[in-house]
Amino acid sequence: MALMSPVELQEGVASLSRGAYFKEASLDMTLSLLTESAARVSGVERVSIWALTDEQRELRCLELFELSSARRSRDGVLYAEDYPAYFRALREEACVAADYAYLHPATAGFAGDYLPRHGITALLDTPIHIRGELQGVLCLEQVGTPQPWTPAHRLFAHAVANLVTLALVEYEAGEARRKASQADERLKVLFEFSRDAMLLVDGGSGQVLDANRQAEKLFGCLRADLAGRSRRQLYQLPDGLDIDQLLARQGEANRPVSAEIRLADGALRSMEITSEQADLGQGRRLALEIIRPS
């Protein structure tokens, strides 16, 4: 199959860039769409995406599309120890453009197995970088009579590699959001169902932001009633002592503060308060206060 013209490649890049790959599809689906679309737009027989793994000692195929058969696969692995010149070229060059793969210095090492096994005669491989680090490669591979790669093909491959980068970055961001959400849910469960009374307090103003079930029982009121109240209203100390200052100092020393609180039945009881503080930046602090009997 003849390679597409520069004009067709430019139109293809614009079409690919408009595709809603990153928000609406899984990573596997996105990579599948990108490889197939890139093959059909460019006329290249084999388009694949590889991830650099095992401390950059191997490349693993994430997605391969073969144009003539519409076959997909993900089972290829290339090892740096077997193809050192190729792995070095990926680290040092903007792309590996081999008009005849058997003779190019970076790809001649594939002549004994990879190239003849797949009938590859020419390849154009573009490194994929994320946050400045080499993370993989986009491969365009011709089968049969080779045709020289043009500057338009290089630009096309670079544009598709950028789309792959965006897809991988979006996937990483989604995974980070998912893990953060799971961690947040776990913390909420631990806070809510702890055996200890807990208050979430604004470290600057000393006002209660939230309370768990045990705190509601301890103080004899709902969390909605506790929210907005200050530490000075909840904890009683001898005259001359300031609870905010004490907790700030004792929190740094990782020691509890002794204070009296009025229980749900109206009685005063001596308690120990431990404050764990987190700096949120821009002068904002958050404190988790755990209240236990002395």
Image: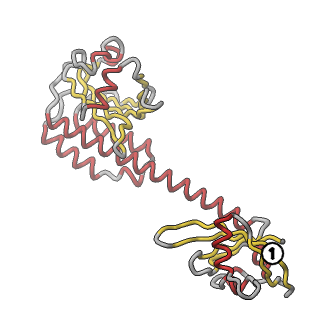
- Where residue 194 sits, quadrant-wise, is bottom right
The residue lying at 21 percent from left, 40 percent from top is: 156
Counting from the top left corner in percent of width and height, residue 55 is at 46, 31
**Number of disc labels:** 1
Q: Is residue 142 left or right of residue 151?
A: right
What's the residue type where badge 1 is placed? Met
> Is residue 238 found left or right of 288 in the rendered image?
right
Position of residue 265 relative to residue 172, above or below, is: below
At 80% from the left and 75% from the top, the residue drawn is 271
The N terminus lies in quadrant: top left
Task: Between residue 234 and residue 123, name the one nearer to us.
Answer: 234
- Residue 151, quarter of picture: top left
Q: Is residue 195 above or below residue 247?
A: above
Judge left or right: residue 53 versus residue 160: right
Q: Position of residue 76 (x, y in %)?
A: 42, 25
- At label 1, counting other C-alpha atoms closer than 10 Å, the crowd grade (few under 14, some 14-19, many 20 or more) is some
| Residue 282 x, y percent position in the rendering | 46, 71
Which residue occupies 36% across, 44% down?
130
Read off the residue under disc 1. Answer: 271
